[in-house]
Image (cartoon, grey):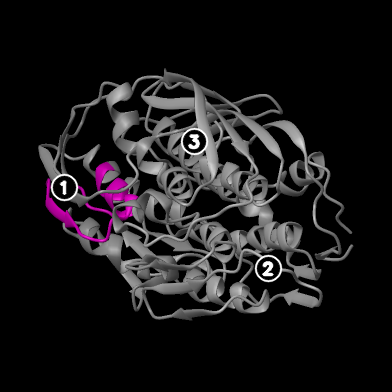
Amino acid sequence: MSNFIKIKNKINKFNKSLLIDGDKSLSIRWALLSSQSLKKCKSSNLLYSEDVLSTLSCLKKLGVKVKISKNFCEIIGLGLNGFKYKNNLILNAGNSGTLGRLILGLLVHSKNNLKLIGDKSLSKRDFLRVTKPLGKFGAKFVSNHGKLPINIKGTDFSKPIKYYENKGSAQCKSAVMFAALNTFGETVIKARKSRDHSELLFKYLKLPIKVIKRKKYDIIKVKGKHKIPSLNYKIPADISSAAFFIVLTALTKDSKLTIKNVNINPSRMGVFYILKLMGVKISKINIRNYKGEKIADLIIRGTGKIKPINCPTRFNSSAIDEFLLIFLIAAKAKGVSYFKNLSELNQKESPRLKWGSKILNKIGIKNTVTKSSIKIYGNPNIKIDRRIIIKNFLKDHRVFMTSVIAALSFGGEWQIFDKSSINTSFPSFLKKIEQLGANLE
């Protein structure tokens, strides 16, 4: 079976309702925290993507009991510092930066030596950003110049630390929080604003955490050695996955889409607010609270008018996974859009800022890109009547899916490789696209 798809026609206008798979960030965090509980934890709507399956596989290797069925996943954890495994165990994080970085936080007290590895893409990414602060707890990490593979030797005498997280990385912050769970005393983190799923889960579980919110950063205080109760959780839909359909609808005139039960955590809603500033018709209804998180139904309508934006950098961290899609909206704007302070995009599965520029070039949209910024000269009358090939993007799932949205929105004849990359985060993506009426070959 070929590992590419062909798209020859734009999608026709549609009026549909969709259910989106569970949130990847919450799925991974649920599994990792459940492994630290001594009680049975059950989840429904868990995202069965490669990243989440890699998480469950690693936990099994560490001695955790995991039961997977079509409708639920059950984990019986081993408690704090309860992992049971043989010396020199190898854990494979696959393509998942969230798993790779967060699980290190749970391994700072590992009794035996371990090695963490990943796929080709993950092995190019920076892990010093987590091994440096985690090393302050007393664990030892030997890496390949800050990259995978990493050898880990835990400590029996960890001590709480003070840590300044200055990158706006939820993964770095969460790794330290996870390490603090099993450390006597109080760990203090001063962190730039980023996703707060870990903080909300800690609060819901009544773990001893205190969060002091400032304008540009948060002070997070975690006291360790507190037993983790059972966590039964219906994972809400992923806003990062929903964003593909939001943008497709926005770029398809006279279309309407309702997406149900979406996680609208404020630390994830940058894409929502950026698109509203650009004139996209999007609204929230049926807003409610669920175990610390806010969820809602989203309604999106296709519009013919897109406004350019000088994007406020305050939205960067809360939209970091959606900027490739936002660039497509900017391509249709009447005027010049400017996005800056986006160097973190190049710390993802592929250098995404560069790939955003490449996709824009392929569809004929002028842009200028630096190491941390991009200026996009939009064209509201964009039409594509040529053949476009997308490949060699390190199998980055978001590059693949963004290319599909571009093809269906702007036309042309596209051949997009590495369709299996969607298994990393959104295995049902192409099925959902077809539900809206897209013709894929």
Residue in front for this viewpoint, 388 or 121: 388
Q: Which residue is mark 1?
A: 189
As drawn, 237 above or below 353: above
Q: Position of residue 84 (x, y in %)?
A: 43, 41
As drawn, 145 above or below 183: below
Residue in front for this viewpoint, 131 or 355: 355
Mark toward the start of the polypeptide (2 vs 3) = 3
> Residue at image x 43%, y 22%?
231
When asked about the image quadrant of residue 80, the answer is top left
Cα distance, mark 2 to mark 1? 47 Å
Locate residue 344 relative to residue 256 in the image: left or right.
left
Q: Which residue is mark 2?
A: 382
Q: Residues within 10 Å of mark 1 (few under 14, many from 20)?
A: many
Labels 2 & 3 near each other (Cβ < 8 A)? no
Q: Report the span colored magenta.
A: 154-177
Labels 2 & 1 near each other (Cβ < 8 A)? no
Q: Position of residue 437 (x, y in %)?
A: 83, 43
Select label 3 or label 1 by which is in front: 1
> Residue at image x 38%, y 73%?
373
Q: Which residue is mark 3?
A: 64
Residue type, numbered disc 2 = Ile
Q: Position of residue 411 (x, y in %)?
A: 78, 64
When asked about the image quadrant of residue 120, the answer is bottom right
